[in-house]
Image (cartoon, coloured by chain):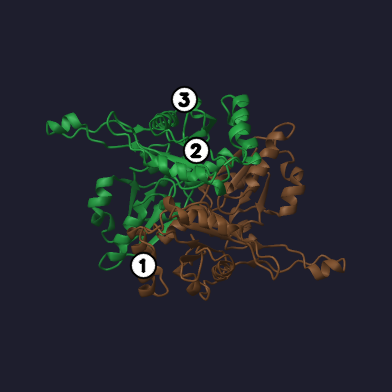
Chain colours: A brown, B green
Amino acid sequence: MLHIIGLGLADEKDISVKGLEIVKKAERVYLEAYTAVLLVDQSVLEAYYGRPIIIADREMVESSSDDILADADTKDIAFLVVGDPFSATTHTDLALRCRQHDPPIKTRTLPNASILTAVGATGLSLYAFGQTVSMVFFTDNWKPDSFYDRVKDNLKLGLHTLVLLDIKVKEPNLQALARGRIVYEPPRFMTAAQCAEQMVETEETRQEGVCGKDKLAVGVARLGSDGEKIVAGTLEELSSVDLGTPLHSLVLCGTNMHEMEWEYVREFAVDQNKFDEIWKRDYAGKS
Amino acid sequence: MLHIIGLGLADEKDISVKGLEIVKKAERVYLEAYTAVLLVDQSVLEAYYGRPIIIADREMVESSSDDILADADTKDIAFLVVGDPFSATTHTDLALRCRQHDPPIKTRTLPNASILTAVGATGLSLYAFGQTVSMVFFTDNWKPDSFYDRVKDNLKLGLHTLVLLDIKVKEPNLQALARGRIVYEPPRFMTAAQCAEQMVETEETRQEGVCGKDKLAVGVARLGSDGEKIVAGTLEELSSVDLGTPLHSLVLCGTNMHEMEWEYVREFAVDQNKFDEIWKRDYAGKS
């Protein structure tokens, strides 16, 4: 059986008791390491779980899944996913391969905490979020703005938008590649500040009143860990806030932000007076 | 410190390793028991955690939170929440009281699996969900239909809707109450079938093409446990499907349902030919 096990968000102890029991007994243990990262190193996980871990990068999952699934019809294989397995598309992909495998391989999924719900730590109600969007690193000539339309759809309904931020791990250096050598770039993780900046930049192009510099947002870092950090403010303010080490995310507030949400989130404001003023003027249920 | 700890969805072993360590050492352990339930009894939790558990019903949390917070400025109190703490409004409520307490009480929240993400087990992408709605038990003269407008908003964008189903625990028997006695009704949990039926009933009144009997939906039961069950079909079909013991939820599919989602979810169909036919006719990106 293939056990797809969520690890939660912060460290080696966020795995469930049930998940840990499976990891300790599994024939092989893989760790999906390209859509999210834990805040601790592989060696910490290996020491705590008492098991060697095979890192499954995108190439392995997409091209060599037969290696991962070898003997899984008769033995227990553990496939670890940071956060919640269902929040990563890897899950559906692998589970479909198991179904189509000959003989079919049983799968079992152990859910865990996800950024999709941990973002409730901001005080914003999870029931007032619309669809989630992703933000990729802009380059000089590639600034995809499809996120803008979805945020706009959410805002029309007064809803918050969770923005998940790009991470680049194991990206080949293009100059080295041109010379026939594979050298990997150091990992890069988008910060909440970079995201806020890209949103304001996109607003300057699109000008439809979706994510200008006066819009309220909340930046979050390392949610679910002891070092979690939450900062609220305008997109302009957040553009210059340093939330520290990865992972970051950002929430663009919906205009229906309820008084109880406001009361909670304002405690995290860079400038509480400004936050209150903008909330009363543009939010507080004004859609 | 008040530790608000998510228990996950199924049983005593879905708590995180970190959460279990806190429970074992806490001064007192409370269990929030009115917005969701685990699939195991309190006694199973107590035996496994090795600690007595105080059941915190709605009245205690809303009116006697001082009892819960007593000594929490100097001692560790554990407050357990089924699923993820942020998915329950109890969390914000208690955390605000801790902030306003004199002296202030520190809080820490340990996230865990939530139905909001575990619903990914259906194969429907979590990034294609709009806002979540709740469905309450209809009575002869009370059939609130505010859910209908929000589902309609989601459908306009082609998005899926997760419908969370009513549970009634510790409801006083009204006849006994009229005679001055407090007798509690047995707990009631809405089934996916009841939800499907109420949606079709509401469509018959509203007639705006949101949740008629031919709409595709997915009923889920006991997600995250070994006994989890997923059934896909029209709302009419789901009205007569018995998914067994609680808890159930339902997803109304969005018209943008992607081919990869369809390929996964059709395996759960009551009648696969019918499911495929309706998907090709009305879904597959037709908004």
For disc 1, the chain is A
User: x, y (%) of residue A158?
Assistant: 43, 55
Residue identifier under label 2 = B251
Say few, some or many: other residues with alpha carbon within 10 Å of mark 3 (under 14 / 14 to 19 / 20 or more). some
Label 2 and label 1: CA atoms lie apart by 36 Å
Kindly state the secondary structure of the residue where label 1 is placed. Answer: helix
Residue identifier under label 3 = B242
Asked whether disc 3 touches disc 1, contact meaning CB atoms under 8 Å apart, the reply is no
Q: Amino acid at mark 3?
A: Asp
Taking the image as drawn, is residue A30 in sight? yes
What residue appears at the point 36 percent right and 43 percent down from the top-left corner? B35
Residue identifier under label 1 = A281
Q: Which image quadrant: the N terminus of chain A?
A: top right
Circle count: 3
What residue appears at the point 61 percent right and 44 percent down from the top-left corner? A4
Q: Amino acid at mark 1?
A: Arg
Is residue A121 depicted above or below B40 in this figure?
Answer: below
For disc 2, the chain is B
User: x, y (%) of residue A255?
Assistant: 41, 59
Task: State the residue lying farthest toward the left.
Answer: B179
Kindly state the secondary structure of the residue where label 3 is placed. Answer: loop
Taking the image as drawn, is residue B12 in sight? no
User: x, y (%) of residue B60?
Assistant: 25, 48
Residue nearest the observer in this picture, A80 or B276: B276
Label 3 and label 1: CA atoms lie apart by 50 Å
